[in-house]
Structure formats: C-alpha cells, structure tokens
Image (cartoon, rainbow, N blue to C red):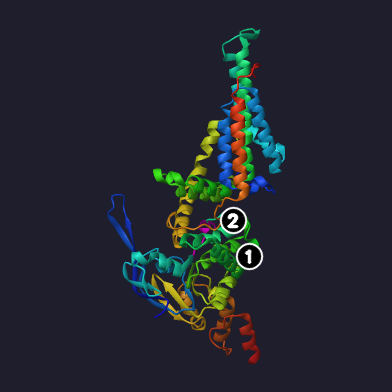
Amino acid sequence: MLRDITLGQYYQTESVIHRLDPRVKLAGTLLFIISLFFFRNFLGYMIAASFLFLVIRLSHVPFRFMVKGMRAVLFLLLLTVVFNLFLTPGEALVSVWKLTITKEGLRTAVTMAVRLAMLVVGSSVMTLTTTPNNLTDGMEKGLRPLKLFRVPVHEVAMMMSIALRFIPILMEETDKIMKAQIARGADFESGNLIRRAKALVPLMVPLFISAFRRANDLAMAMEARCYRGGDGRTKMKPLIYRSRDRIAYLCILVYLVAGIWLGRLELPVAG
Amino acid sequence: MGIIRAKDVTFEYIRRDEEGNVEGITTAVDNVSLNVKQGDFIAILGHNGSGKSTLAKHINAILYPTEGTVWVDGMDTADEEKVWDIRRTAGMVFQNPDNQIIGQVVEEDVGFGPENMGVPAKEIWERVEESLKAVGMYEFRKHSPNKLSGGQKQRVSIAGVLAMHPKCIVLDEPTAMLDPRGRKEVIRAVRALNDVEGVTVVLITHYMEEIIYADKVFVMDKGRIAMEGTPKEIFSEVEDLQELRLDVPQVTLLAYELQKRGIMLPDGILTAEELAEALHLR
C-alpha cells in the first residue's frame, strides 16, 4: 500500500528537455512563472500558452501527465474563480438573487484561472523531465552565489538528497510498524478524524526513534567515508553547460522579451 | 610493524544521569593488543556485547581509546590531523545496509567516498567501475539501492569503501541482517577482495562459519581477547567456544562428538568435505 508511492513524478523518456541542464530548467520555470504576472492582454497569455505547448511537445511526455498535477490544485482553482467571479465590484453582467457577476469579476476570474493552470503545468514540465537528484544538483550549483550571504547551499542540497533517499525507507518502515500494530489489535481505520489521528500517535513514536537511529548510523557511515562538508569535494557528474543549454537560454530570453513586450501592449479590445 | 596495531587499548563508555554526573562506567574494550599484517584476513569473533564492534570503530577513528594506542598504517588514531588519512586507509562497512547508502543510484553511492576525497570526475568513474566489478554489482550500477536485496546492498557498501582505495577494510557484522544467501554473497565478495585485490580485511562477526577462511581469528569476550589463533586452532577448542556462548559449526561439532566416542579424527575440522575425507582415510 504505502510503498507504491513514487517520489517526485519523473517521467522516464528520451527528449531534448530531459537532457537539458537542470539549472536551465529551474531558471526557465522560474522566469516563465514570473512572466505570467506581467501580461496585460490576452496576447501575452497566448504567447505563454504556445511556448508551454511547444516545450511539452518537445519533452515527449504525454499531455495527461501534465494535467495530472492540476488535480491537486483543482479546489484552489475553483475557489479562486468563484470568489473573483462574485466578489469583484464593478459593472454588473448577470444578477441572480444576491449574487452578481461583474464584468471585471469575470475578467479577473478567467485571468487567475489561466495563470494558475499555466503555473502548475509549467512546473510539472520541470518535475516530469528532471530526476529529483538532478534537480538537487542543479539547485546546489545554481544557488552557489548565495553562499556569499552565508546560505548553506551545499548542506541544504545534501539534506534534500538524503531525504529523498530515506523517504521510501521510512515509508516501508511505517508500513511494517502499522502491520505489526494491526496484528496486535490496533485500529487505524474506524472512528472519526480525531480518533484516527490519535491512533497514529503510537505509530509515530517508534517511527521517530527509528529515524533518529538511522540518522545516527548514516552520519557515522558518511564520516567513515571521509565526508566533511562541501569544501574540497569533487562531483562525479559535474554540471557543465553544453550548446543545447545555451540555445535553451536563448529561447527563454526570446520568449520573455516577446511575451512581455506584446503582452503589455494596450490593445483596443482588452482580453 | 603491521597495518593495524593496537597496544593495551581500553575503552570505557561513561553513562551519565540527567545532571551530567557519572552514573557508571562500562568497560567495552579491556586491555586489548593486536597486530594485523598487510594483506591478512582477520576475523574477530564474539557474541553480543563482547566489545568487538567497539574495537572495530577504533580502527576507523570513530572512537578513540580511553587508554592505550591504535596505529593504522603507522598513524596514531588519536591524532586529529590524521583522521581523514586514517579513514581513507581503513574503510569501514557497517551492519545495516540501508543506513549506510547515501546515493539514490548505485553508482552515485559508490562515487560518494571519492567525491569527498576530491578525486577528479574522470578518475571517480574509473574507480566506481572497477569497484562495482570487484563485488560483482556492475550490472546494477543504474539501479536504485531501494530495489536491491540485503546482500546486494551490502556489496554496494563494500564497493563504496573499495572506491576509496583503502589498504584495509573493516567490516562490522556486515552479514548480521542478511539471509543465508545474502551472507554467502557478501563473504564471497570479501574473500575476493582479500585474495585478488590484496586488501587487508578485518571481519567482525558472530557467525562461526564465516571465519573459516580467515588467516587469524581473535575471539572476544567481555572486552578482552579470550582466544587467538588460526581457525583450525580455534575450532579445536570446542568446549571453550561453547563456554563463550558461540555456536560451533555443525560439522566441527559432529567431528568433535565422534572424536569423543573414540573415532580417531584430526582436530579442528571445518568443512563437510574435510570430515568426509578424514573418515574415508581411516
């Protein structure tokens, strides 16, 4: 049951997007998301959508995987749309009972929905085409300048990759402890939410103890293998920009300039 | 002088209560001296709580002796400046395979040690390849460690240490959490390291059948070295071993019982083949 959960949502296939340096993908996603908040007309969103569509086609990941991520935010999306639709003051369009849909409300609702949807799909493209450890590597190297401000970049990246390695192990362990407790009459399934939450307490205690013990063992094993922080460390798989990465940066730049320039024009018919 | 040398080593665990007052002292290692030659296969045998794991951790400078000295390749383990040199000279494999694998892919885990040592990327790849081949795990290099069996994980851990090019590998009960098949796999890999690569091996275990290939065996009890000698010498002392609560292999036990009933057999028979031959010769 629990062990079926896979981490991240990496979709294994061969594509240009998969082979890109994770730093390009991180920067690209970030810039794409930021760009979504600059548009003033529908043309900007059209450009963003076509850019996104192109990237998805290039990534060879089936479209339904992209939309999968939407399910998690569907509730949030609906909430945003409903609130914006009914609570924005302005010129009334339709009025039913006490609820009024305004022209401005309709416009904000649609804009917000489109933004949110593209934001989620945009980040899905990154997580679907990059393995979690590749992503951590990208963050470590990409954020290295932050070291000047005493941000422990290497340590954070190391923590993330260790967490990624241990989550499946701890899941399996939870599963085991649960089964052992069920075998001795523990009940995790009946009762209301509070009762079920309470039943989890005896599960958490052994899980935490075991996690601490593992952490202790792992720290010793890492020290035994000469780990002493990020200084003086070399990388087995160093990140090096290749020509395809430079081209990708160029594409992102072109998109940004075109999108923001055209997306901020005052068009006669506002979208 | 040998690659590992311990002189009068004593280690005490000090238990403290909540205020930090000393509650009691447990002497885990008590006045132990030993000398291991380069290229040897040494086994340290003992039941739980005999101090064998504590002694092992001294070789890797994880613990320092309370009294006495441990030298690894001539370096005093209490010398803080030499810690990293000692750890790369004497690699260590631990009991729980899950808690010592850091990488999410087999090859990345094997590369972890060399990365820490600052080895250039190209050489890391060469080391990873040769280490994985030495333990017979090369075809699994792209796998996730979570999908491997216990024996396979432990072989990956050994490869991880091997990639650091140590002169000596200390294995702290590497087979304690494995099934019989996994135990065989690991022991076979360890023997290959010793025979083919010439790496000094210190194997800590409580399984008697794993020590029959050792050049020399130390039996520990209550922190002291209770017996030492070749496996044959050790196995001849069936009664002493039983007194130390160690399980003598069935073949050895059978030969011992036969001997007691008046059948003339040589002392310290270790394998079924050996016993069969001895019986046949009679």
Amino acid type at circle 1 is Tyr
Q: Is residue B184 visible?
A: no
Q: Which residues are magenta?
A: B93-101
Q: In the image shown, does B176 or B168 lie closer to the viewer?
A: B168
Residue A234, horizontal then vertical, whole percent: 49, 58
Drawn side of residue B18 relative to residue A196, left or right: left
Amino acid type at circle 2 is Val
Q: Residue A143 got which mark?
A: none
Residue B99 covered by magenta stretch: yes
Q: Are marks 2 and 1 on the same chain?
A: yes
Label 1 Cα crowd, 10 Å radius (few <14 / some 14-19 / many 20+): some
Q: Is residue A157 visible?
A: yes
Residue B30, horizontal then vertical, whole percent: 35, 71
Q: Is residue A70 above or below residue B72?
A: above
Determine the residue positioned at 58% across, 83% down: B255
Q: Secondary structure at mark 1?
A: helix
Q: In the image shown, does B69 or A227 lie closer to the viewer?
A: A227
Q: Is residue A210 above or below residue B186?
A: above
Drawn side of residue A54 relative to residue B41, left or right: right
Label 2 Cα crowd, 10 Å radius (few <14 / some 14-19 / many 20+): some
Q: Chain of mark 1?
A: B
Q: Secondary structure at mark 2?
A: loop
Quadrant of the frame with the N terminus of chain A: top right
Say which quarter of the image contains residue A127.
Answer: top right
Q: Earlier in the sequence, mark 2 or mark 1?
A: 2
Say which quarter of the image contains residue A25.
Answer: top right
**Mark 2 sits on what residue?**
B105
**Mark 1 sits on what residue?**
B138
Q: CA distance from mark 2 to mark 1?
A: 12 Å
Q: Chain of mark 2?
A: B
Residue A88, horizontal then vertical, whole percent: 57, 14
Quadrant of the frame with the C terminus of chain A: top right
